[in-house]
Image: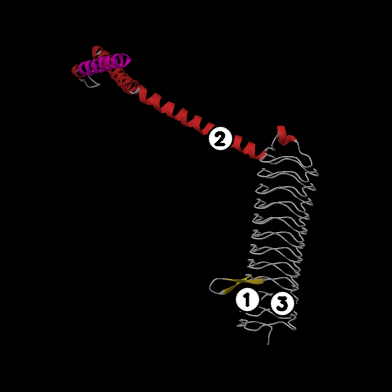
Amino acid sequence: MITKLCNLVIMNKIILASILSAILLTIPFTSVSAQSPEEKKLKEENAKLKQKIKELIQEIVSLKKENAKLKNPEKSQDKTKSETKTSDKTAKATKQTTDTTKQTTQPANPTGKCANLAKGALLMKCDLHGMNLSGKDLSGAKLEGANLEGANLKKADLSWASLPGVTLEKANLYDADLQRADLKGANLRNANLEKAILLDADLQGANLHNANLKKAYGSSAKLEETSFIGANLQGAHLRDANLEKANLYDANLQGANLQGANLKGADLRNANLEKADLSASVIISSKTNKMYDSYISADLQGANLQGANLKGADLSCANLEKADLRNANLQGADLSCANLQNANLEGANINGADFSRANLDGVKGLD
């Protein structure tokens, strides 16, 4: 209805403009010098008509624009609704993201059995992420499948605790007591275990990527197939620990005590073992296959063993290609069958070392 009325007004305006233009054309033109008073009056009327026609044309243009808007009101409304919906969706997504962030950053608020944070407590599958458990006595507690991500367990007592498969990513376990704790398959990625007590602890298959184990005490710990990629084990005490098939790629073992440790098949590529004590440690083992005897040798390719104590160590068939053994103590070490290609043995003590069948191509320091 509004559109029809608008069209009618426009038509009337156009007709009126046409009539005025026709009247304007009928007025005779007279030169200025011969104009009579009547002619001057006609000239003034002519000017007024021209102005009126101009105003009418402007009105017609404006009305046409308004009419175009009125013709498609639904499209305009749909566009506005679409923009509103998009805005609402964005706001909702932002809220969800904020809520998720709050859930992960805010500490858990355990209830029921999960609130019983005491010695020998049953805390299986409890959500304890981000909680402050500093100094807590949780010795002997059952924490199978619990979430302790980002929890503060500084100086906490977790000795004899059952923690298989537990999430301890980014947790603070500084100086915590974990002796004889069961941490098989636990996630300790980026966790802080500096000065932690891991005596006889079971960490088989655990993930300790980039974890801090500086000066940790893990004598006789079970570390088979444990991943220490990029971990800091500087000055760690791992005497007699079982590191068979452990992944120590790019790990820092500078000054670590690995006396008598089992490193059969361990991956020590690019590891820093400068001044580490590997005396009497076992680097390889042989096992019988149905068809032939094969060796599980440690991979020490490119490892830094500068000043390391490898006295009496069994390094037979180990891969020491490009390893840095400068000033290392290899007295009485078994390096038979080892790959020492392009290794650096400058200043190393090799008295009584066995290099039989070893690959010594490009080795420095054996001149």
Mark 1 falls on what kind of element? Answer: loop
Please provide the residue range marked out in magenta.
Answer: 1-24
View extreme (front): residue:
290
Q: How far separated are the C-alphas under marks 1 and 2?
A: 58 Å
Seen in the image, is 42 located left or right of residue 274? left
- Where does label 2 land, which residue? 94
- Where does label 1 land, which residue? 317
Q: How far separated are the C-alphas under marks 2 and 3?
A: 57 Å
Crowding at dot 3, Cα within 10 Å, few <14 / some 14-19 / many 20+, comes out as many
Q: Nearer the viewer, residue 310 or 213?
A: 310
Q: Nearer the viewer, residue 236 or 86?
A: 236
Image height of 81 relative to 45, above or below? below
Which residue lies at the image location 59% right of the left edge and 71% below the top edge?
288
Magenta includes 20?
A: yes
Image height of 42 relative to 304, above or below? above
Camera sees residue 4: yes
Image height of 192 relative to 37, above or below? below
Query: How far across and how far down the image is residue 122, in percent?
Result: 72, 40
Which residue lies at the image location 74% right of the left edge and 70% below the top edge?
278
Query: How far across and how far down the image is residue 94, in percent?
Result: 56, 35
Seen in the image, is 43 located left or right of residue 230? left
Mark 3 falls on what kind of element? Answer: loop
Q: Nearer the viewer, residue 130 or 20?
A: 130
Image height of 211 relative to 22, above or below? below
Which residue lies at the image location 75% right of the left edge and 50% below the top edge?
173
Q: Amino acid under label 3?
A: Arg
Query: How far across and how far down the image is residue 124, in percent?
Result: 68, 41
Crowding at dot 1, Cα within 10 Å, few <14 / some 14-19 / many 20+, comes out as many
- Where does label 3 land, which residue? 326
Q: Earlier in the sequence, mark 2 or mark 3?
A: 2
Frontmost of labels 1 and 2 is 1
